[in-house]
Amino acid sequence: MGVQVKPFSRVTGPVAPLDRVDVDTDQIIPKQFLKRIEKTGYGDFLFYDWRFQTNGSPKPSFVLNRKEYRSAAILLTGRNFGCGSSREHAAWALCQFGIRAIIAPSFADIFQSNCFQNGLLPVTLPNKVLRFLMDQVNSAPGYRLTVDLKECLVSDEAGFEASFEIDSFRRKCLLEGLDDIGLALRHLDEIRVFEEARGLAG
Amino acid sequence: MSSAGMGSTSHPGETAQTEMEAARPRTLFEKIWDAHVVHRPEGRPDLLYVDLHLVHEVTSPQAFEGLRRAGRTVRQPGLTVATVDHNVPTWPRSLPVRDDVARRQIEILEKNVDEFAITFYGMDHARQGIVHVMGPELGYTQPGMTIVCGDSHTATHGAFGSLAFGIGTSQVEQVLVTQCLWMDKPRTLKVDVQGSLSLGVTAKDLILSIIGVLGVDGGRGHVIEYTGKAVRSLSMEGRMTVCNMSIEAGARAGMIAPDETTFEYVRGREYAPRGDAFESVVARWKTLVSDPGAEYDRVVTVDVSNLAPTVTWGTNPGMVVPVTGRVPDPNDAANRSDREAASNALKYMGLVPGTPMQEIPLDRVFIGSCTNARLEDLRSAAEIVRGRKVHPDVRGMVVPGSTSVKREAEREGIDRVFTDAGFEWREAGCSMCLGMNPDILGPEERCASTSNRNFEGRQGRGGRTHLVSPPMAAAAAVEGHFVDIRRWESR
C-alpha cells in the first residue's frame, strides 16, 4: 500500500468566520506559491493577499490574524467555497495552517475532492444553520464547535446540534484513512481486462 | 507514442450493457461515462478509466514524487502527454528562465517525463503550447474520450464530445499509477442555446452571458451539455471557448456533441486515426449524441439573438453586464450575501455604481489564454487593429496559445498587424491569464483580458481584470476604453 490519508474522526476547536461567498482558490493560495515542488510549507501562505500587506506584514483586521482565531481548527464560510482553479495547494495550505474541517452551505467540486484526498473534512450545512453559527462566532469570539464524522454531527457546548450528510464512501475513507490509489489497485484485474478489450498493453 | 495510442483506444458505446440499459435513452454524457466504468461497486463512486492524461509543470511534481516514494510507475505512459505552459516566460525562448523557483519546476518535469517515458512538448519544442490548445491541435483530443488534467480548464476538450475535467494533484498521481479515478457520477444539465449571434458577438460573449445566468455555482455537481442552433453554428475554436469556461459556472465539465465541424477539425491531425481507420472511427463518433427522450437532471434555455458583447465588472466571471450597460449597484442585489459580494468586488475593482462600462479607462490589454488564444481568436482581434494604433495610455500584449498558433499567425502576417499597431507579440504560454510568469498587472492596473478569470489578484496583486472577447479586447486597446464592437466596426 502507498501513502495513506490522515484519518479523520472528530475535531473540537475554535471556529474562524470567513463570511464571504464564492471564495476562490486564487484567494486561498495565490499563484506565486504554486511554483514550489513540495507538498508542505503552504500554511504560511494561506489567504496570502488577504492576510498580509505587500511588505509581508500581517493585516491586523483579517480574521486569521486575530488572536482568537490564530489556532482555528474549523473554518466557517459562505457558499461555493473553493471555486476556480483545481490547485490542491489550496487544501494543503488550509491543512497546514491547522484547519481540520470547513463548514459551508456548499463547496466547489474539485476543491471538495481535494479535501477528501487530504483528510480535510468539508461539512455541508444549510445556509440558515450557517447564519446561526456565524452569529454565534461573532457574538462569542473563541466559540468552539465539535465536528464528529462518525456521528455526522456538528455540536457546541451549549447544546447546539446539527447533523450533516456525507457520501458514505468518502466517510469510510476518511474514518479509516484509506487512499484512492490503494483502493483502485485492488481492482487491477478489472483494469487489465478493460485495457485488453481496447488493445492496450497493461 | 505506442501504435495503440490515443487514436484507436476509445470505444464508447461498445461496453456490454444489459438489454434494459441499452433500451433506455441516454445523454451523451451517460454514454461516455458508461463506456469507461471499470468497476461499479454498490453505493460507492465508480472506478472510471481515463483515455488521455494531460500533464503540466505546476500540478504534477508532487504526484511524480509520490510515485517514486512508493516505488510505483506510470501505468500508461502512452496515454499521458506533458508540456510546460503555466510558468514559462513569454520572452524569446533563447533566453534563460530567470525565476529560479519556476526554472526548477520546469526542470523537474523534464526529469520526470524522462524517467517515466512520457511524451513531452518542452520549452523548445515546435508544438509546445498551453495544454488545452496543444492537445486538440495535435489531434490527441477526440470525441468519446475521458480526458483529465491537473487543471480546471480541462473542460475545454469537451468541445469535441469528450468528457474532460480538472483534477487535483492527488488524483493526478492516481491516474499516473492506475489510469483510473474514483468518481461520483455528476448530474446532467442541458444548456440549450437558441437564436443566432449578431455580427461581432462571439462564443466568449455567449459563455459569459450563460455564466451570468447560471451564476458561478449554478453548474456545481453537474456536467453541462450545450445544445441548440447557436452552439451548432460555432467553429471548434468557439466551442472550445464555451466548454473551457464551464468550470466558471461551477460545472464539473462542459460538452458539445460532435458533428461534421468536429470531424473536419480532427481529420488529418497528427495523432488522429488516418484513412479507413478515420472513416470507421467517425461512424462510431456519430453515435455520440444524446438520444431523443434522454433525460437531464436540469434544463436551462437561453436565446442569444439579442445578446450584446459582454464584459465582466466584478471579481468573478458571473459578474457580467452588456457593454452597453453600467456598473451595477450592489443595493439591487437579491440578498445580503450577493450584496456584500458586489460591494467587495466594486471596492476591489475601483468602480462606482452607475458608471457606463464604455467610459472605464484601461491600462492594459491581454489577448491570450486557453480560452481565447487560438488562431481564429488572433485573426479576429487582428482584423480590428489592422491599420490602427494601440491607445497611448494602453499597453497591449498578445500571447499565442501555442507555438504552432504563433508560427501559423506569423505565416499569415498577423504578428506584424499586432506589432505595427503597438502590441507586444510574445511566445506561447498561459502568461498573464494567471500571472505565474513575469507577465503580471501592477496594483490597480486595469486590464481588458480575453482570459477566463477575473478573481482578485489573478493577473497580479491588486490588478483589475475585465473579461471580454478577442475583438472586444482589440477595440478596447485602440480606444483606451470598452466600445460596443457592433457599432464600432461599422464606423
Image: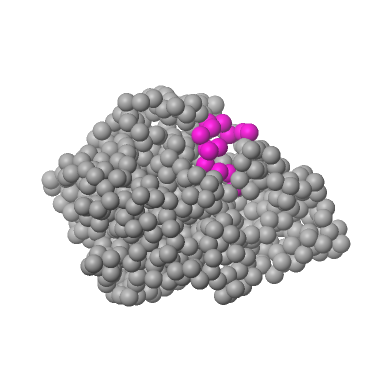
| Number of numbered tags placed on the structure image | 0
What residue is at 53 percent from the left and 31 percent from the top? Answer: A37
**A141 in magenta:** no
Residue at the limit of the structure toward the front, as seen here: B392
Quadrant (top left/top right/bottom left/bottom right) for the C terminus of chain B: bottom left
Residue shown at the point (64%, 59%) measured from the top left: A20
Q: Is residue B78 left or right of residue A94?
A: left
Between B120 and A198, the residue placed more toward the observer is B120
Question: Which residues are drawn in magenta?
Answer: A28-41
Q: How is the image coloured?
A: one colour
Residue B87 appears left or right of B374: right
Q: Who is closer to the viewer here, B220 or B458?
A: B458
Give x and y (percent) for residue B2. Answer: 27, 33
**Quarter location, residue B321:** bottom left
Residue B222 can be seen in this image: no
- Give how far across and how far down residue A48 sits, in percent: 62, 43
Magenta span has A37?
A: yes
| A108 shown above or below B63 | below
- In x, y percent, where is residue A184? 50, 42
Tell me where residue B294 appears, x and y as whole percent: 36, 71
Q: Is residue B264 visible?
A: yes
Residue at image x 35%, y 49%? B392
Image point (36%, 36%), residue name: B90
Q: Nearer the viewer, residue A73 or B375?
A: B375
**Dividing the image into 4 quarters, which one contains the N terminus of chain B?**
top left
Judging depth in this view, the residue of B443 and B59 nearest the camera is: B443
Q: Residue furthest right?
A: A158
Q: Quadrant of residue B461?
A: top right
